[in-house]
Amino acid sequence: MVTLQSAENALKTVYLGVVANQLNINANPLLGKIKQSTKDVWGKEVRKLAPFGINGGIGAGAETDALPQAAGNNYVQFVSDLKNLYGKIELSDKAIRASQNSVGAFVNLLNDEMEGLIKASSFNFGRMLYGDGSGLLATIASIDSTTKTIITLDSVRNLIEGMVIDVYNGETKVTSGLRIKYVDRVNKKIHVTSYTETLAKDYTLYVQNSKGYEISGLGKIFSTSDTLYGVSREDYPWLVPYTQTKAGQISDSMIQTAIDYLEEVTGSTINYISCSSKVRRMYQEYLGAYRRNIDIMELQGGYKAITYNGIPLVADRFVEDDAMYLLNTDDFTLHQLCDWKWLEGEDGKILKQNAGYPTYSATLVKYAELVCDRPNGQAKITGITSVTADAGSSENQA
């Protein structure tokens, strides 16, 4: 007979390993390229010494001259809080009792819940990899004040049906717990559960209770903020990555210019290129226009990607429409206190009854932060257009 105890055992011994593997490797192709480590985690923080420049104790001289003065490696300490990442499933008492005499029905029940958890967690973790840590999903462009259910946004790439969101006016939460029922991706609109508060243009959307608590993704590294991991960009200019704006028509030369700069100035070797699906289509169009073959490679997790000179070029839904990231993933580490674990009570139970409701819930948790050791070894190109468009001007910022 299926019981709560057998459900507990299944979640701990059967599903945990599978779910952790899915979230660590298959959640996003970029995540599959980033190493994960418990090193440099101190209490609730990541404290890491990041080297920059070279050892200065070198030189040449005459046979009887003094030896070069010692000048050791340069280091700066990065400090960042571990972020709390959660995933929650819920089982009703009725569903559990209905499957008590059927192991197959119970397994199907758990499978459905775990698949839903993996899908939701993969989406949000992939989104956070490209975010700036603030958790910003989108900004309101206009409001349909008559229906109180339709919101027009500046972008919907970070949104999906079923997501629960909060709306803010600056730092003030205006409304919370709105559930997205439908995403109109053509018109950049979302249909949500009805709200009574007054919303307005430029209000911002975040995942429920997540504002300011997400990992420091690529958006943070390429942001214009004064500090990164607690270190001043003004004091350490190498914290500023390479950017090229108004890039114009896509071409091999455009991509190679950024790669050459990184190799010559920082010694960084690019091994991963990420772009929007729109930019990938532009590149395929460019290759077709010059009768070039399109090479395909398979990445960890079963993802397939086209290549640029042997470097995987991967389309990711969370990249801006006109953008491309050129990354050395060896410079990234996901520092974690531990791998994914079930949140346990004092009695060791992971399935707990929700107070006042005939339901039981279990929560997956991971405490982690993404750190890039060498921000100036990464590049971002924006303003990319197709080979059929008029080329724009170029601005290079190192």
Image (cartoon, helix red, strand yellow):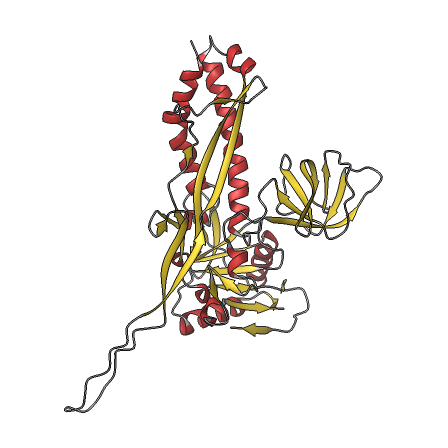
> Residue 345's quadrant in the figure?
top left
- State whether residue 218 is above or below residue 82: below
Screen quadrant of the N terminus: top left
Query: Residue 52: where, in percent of width, then height?
Result: 37, 69
Instruction: Give whichever of 269, 92 is nearer the camera.
Output: 92
Confirm whether residue 372 shows in the render. no
Give the percent coordinates (x, y) of residue 220.
53, 58
Does residue 198 appear left or right of residue 103 in this picture?
right
Asked whether residue 398 is in view, the answer is yes
The residue depicted at 46 percent of the width and 19 percent of the height is: 107
Q: Residue at x 79, y 43 (%)?
A: 198
Q: Residue furthest left?
A: 64
Left or right of 279? Residue 297 is left
- Decide which of 141, 235 is in the foreground and name it: 235
Residue lying at 36% horizontally and 50% vertically, measured from the top left: 42
Q: Using the rendered view, name the quadrant where residue 372 is placed.
A: bottom left
- Residue occupying the far front of the picture: 346
Give the number of callouts: 0
- Along the viewing direction, whichever of 133 and 384 lies nearer the viewer: 133
Q: Position of residue 300 (x, y in %)?
A: 41, 45
Q: Quadrant of residue 53?
A: bottom left
Q: Decide: is 92 above or below 381.
A: above
